[in-house]
Amino acid sequence: MAKYIFVTGGVTSSLGKGIIAASLAKLLQARGLRVTIQKFDPYINVDPGTLNPYEHGECFVTEDGAETDLDLGHYERFLNIFTTQANNVTTGRIYQTVINKEREGAYLGKTVQVVPHITDEIKRRMQLLGQGGEYDVVITEIGGTVGDIESLPFVEAVRQLQWELPEEDSVVVHLTLIPYLKAAKELKTKPTQHSVKMLSQEGVHPDIIVCRTEKPLGPELRRKIALFCNVKQEAVIEAADAPTIYEVPILMMMEGLDTIVLKKMNITGYGEPEMTKWKAFLDKLKYPKGKVNIGLIGKYIELQDAYKSILESFIHAGAMNECKVEITNVHSEFITQDNVSEKLAGLDGLLVAPGFGHRGVEGKIVAVQYARENGLPFFGICLGMQMAVIEFARNVLGLTTAHSTEMDPDTKEPVIDLMEEQKKVTAKGGTMRLGSYPCTLKTGSLAESIYGVSSITERHRHRWEFNNKYLEQFEKAGMIASGKNPGTGLVEIVEIPNHPFFIGVQYHPELKSTVENPQPVFVHFVKAAKAYADKKMETRSAVLKGEMI
């Protein structure tokens, strides 16, 4: 049977429970333990699939087609493993299951209550991944902040599991904030004391306290936290602000977080963490040999979490190319034909991001046209690929009314149309084309050279597709379909062979990029942007030399 680690948060949200959970998991995995992480979210939505990105950040899609919390992306990127539907559970999913059972008569006429029925279902889900013998340790991150009404059933479930499991089979890690008051020039432990007190009042006592802080915690402060929160001083862990999330596992290793966990769980026989590859990645990340400026065209740029996996993929690809990738956010709503050259000036590459709805679409199309006509390396993802198709149809094929039926249901030239199986769908949640699908790559294409194989699988999240009625016209004019689904013929990749780098993909490649396996399209896109930047520099140097002569 697996052992269980529960990660809770106090004082405030957004402290980084997911990063701490993923970092601890990475250290345990690096010692040779089989580890997985799951996230329990307190909101009543069944999943984040119907949530606006401004509400919840990006929706991360797993291999098996589950729409999940973005923290699962961190889990996969750190551990280099796939997560599934079972790794993300919401209050909505818990209540839906219990209510369905009640309707079926499974409770034999009993009054259905939060305790025991809701908490029993939470406990069942918490232990689900640990019962198959696949994992030695299951880490469960409890969303929200201790004291929230929504989190109470989850905290109660943890209390019950602590009572039911052998003492050495469960550990609670509580993440809190130690604020620094500039006026007093000191760190304050009182919020942490109150947070631990509140958690203890709910019946759960933390074994380890991880303290987010801007300033170093001295021995006196650690002793004070340990004394007032009733934990050993060695169990007070400093989590200082780091330049990158990928340094956190190393910081946690230096603090001995994994060591204290192993000690409390009585896990022996495992050596020190093997972090050689991770440290090599960090060296490349911290000491780049070059720099590129990539323009990210989207409509949710005010919230960086909306494009979290894309931004992390650029970090992985940048390290692979020993190059720092600087992102310039450009809001698609404010791009026009008159200002596009000004908005995109100085870029070495352009990525048009995914999204839904008509807002900002015309700006994306104008940006694609600029990249295509000026030889600027271009990468379009999902909606970004569809915008490239529409732009090409309008400005190369002469189909001036070309559009997607998502934005213009009455368009006379529907080059992007609703997928056949989606036309009868009315419910929104969990009904898109979701999860991993195969794709066959065209021999001799850019896509094949990027992946180095003839067949791939990538994750999807969409309802609209390339309209194959127009495929022959596109290919004759110079935009080819270099990747197709072998079963349905659905166009998955388009590219323009006579362009330095122009590729659009219907799937979401960013969802599979990890520290150990950077996503190939991102790697080659950054490489192309680097070549573009170098060429600009050479041209500039030649001009300057000419002026000096």
Image (cartoon, rainbow, N blue to C red):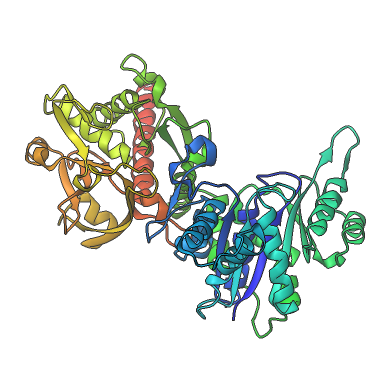
Give the mark count: 0
Q: Quadrant of the N terminus?
A: bottom right
Look at 68% across and 70% down and name the residue there: 161
540 to 217, vertically: above or below = above
465 to 395, vertically: above or below = below
Q: Nearer the viewer, residue 240 or 439?
A: 439
Residue 498 location (% of width, % of height): 17, 39
Q: Nearer the viewer, residue 309 or 313?
A: 309
Q: Quadrant of the C terminus?
A: top left
Residue 181 location (% of width, % of height): 85, 37
Look at 61% across and 55% down and name the residue there: 19
Look at 73% across and 78% down and name the residue there: 168
Outermost residue to the front: 109
Residue 13 lies in what quarter of the image?
Answer: top right
Q: Is residue 60 left or right of residue 253?
A: left
Q: Is residue 400 left or right of residue 325?
A: left
Q: Is residue 371 left or right of residue 399?
A: right
